[in-house]
Amino acid sequence: MKAPKWWIGLADDDVEGTYVWYGTNDKPTFTDWSPGNPSDSGSNEDCGEFDKNGGNGLQWNDVNCHALRPVICESVQMFGDFDLPENFCHCQKS
Ligand SMILES: [Ca+2]
Ligand SMILES: [Ca+2]
């Protein structure tokens, strides 16, 4: 993985402070927020990201949903090693 940060598919844009998985609205059974996060800085951070430099490394941070990040996708099958383009997606709900 080349990018330093990636979307992980968690958001609290429906109910502030309650993070759910994008697409299912299930609450996560595991979290790995970096210290001090989720911080909702500026009352403006509703999407979760992996941060390569976060906390102990690859811990989670909440950030503005309009930030552009590559996305990590759940898959049941490996299709080989490939890189998604930079700025491929963001987690803003439509
Ligand atoms: Ca938030
Ligand atoms: Ca944050």
Image (cartoon, rainbow, N blue to C red):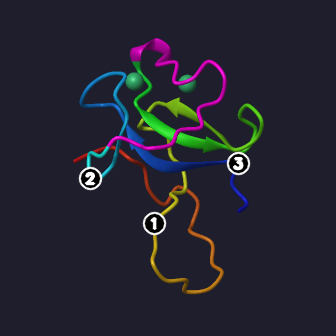
| Placement of 7 over or under 18, stated as above or below | below
- Could you tell me residue 70's position as x and y percent? 54, 56
Secondary structure of the residue carrying tag 3 is loop
Q: As rendered, which of 78 and 86 lies closer to the eye? A: 78
Q: Report crowding for label 2: few under 14, some 14 to 19, many 20 or more residues within 10 A (C-alpha).
A: few
Q: Report crowding for label 1: few under 14, some 14 to 19, many 20 or more residues within 10 A (C-alpha).
A: few
- Could you tell me residue 24's position as x and y percent? 26, 53
Q: Amino acid at mark 3?
A: Pro
**Mark 3 in CB contact with mark 2 (< 8 angstroms):** no
Circle on res. 24: 2
Q: As rendered, which of 89 and 76 lies closer to the eye? A: 76
Please tell me which of labels 1 and 2 falls first in the chain. Answer: 2
Question: Is 42 colored magenta in this rendering?
Answer: yes
Please tell me which of labels 3 and 1 falls first in the chain. Answer: 3
**Mark 1 in CB contact with mark 2 (< 8 angstroms):** no
Q: Furthest-top residue in view?
A: 42
Name the residue beneath numbered marker 3: 4
Name the residue beneath numbered marker 1: 74
Mark 3 to mark 2 CA distance (whole Å): 26 Å
Question: Is 20 colored magenta in this rendering?
Answer: no
- Could you tell me residue 67's position as x and y percent? 49, 39
Secondary structure of the residue carrying tag 1 is loop
Q: Residue at x 73, y 31 (%)?
A: 55
Q: Amino acid at mark 1?
A: Glu
Q: Residue at x 57, y 23 (%)?
A: 37
Please tell me which of labels 3 and 2 falls first in the chain. Answer: 3
**Mark 3 in CB contact with mark 1 (< 8 angstroms):** no
Mark 1 to mark 2 CA distance (whole Å): 12 Å
Quadrant in which residue 11 is drawn: top left
What residue range appears in magenta?
27-43
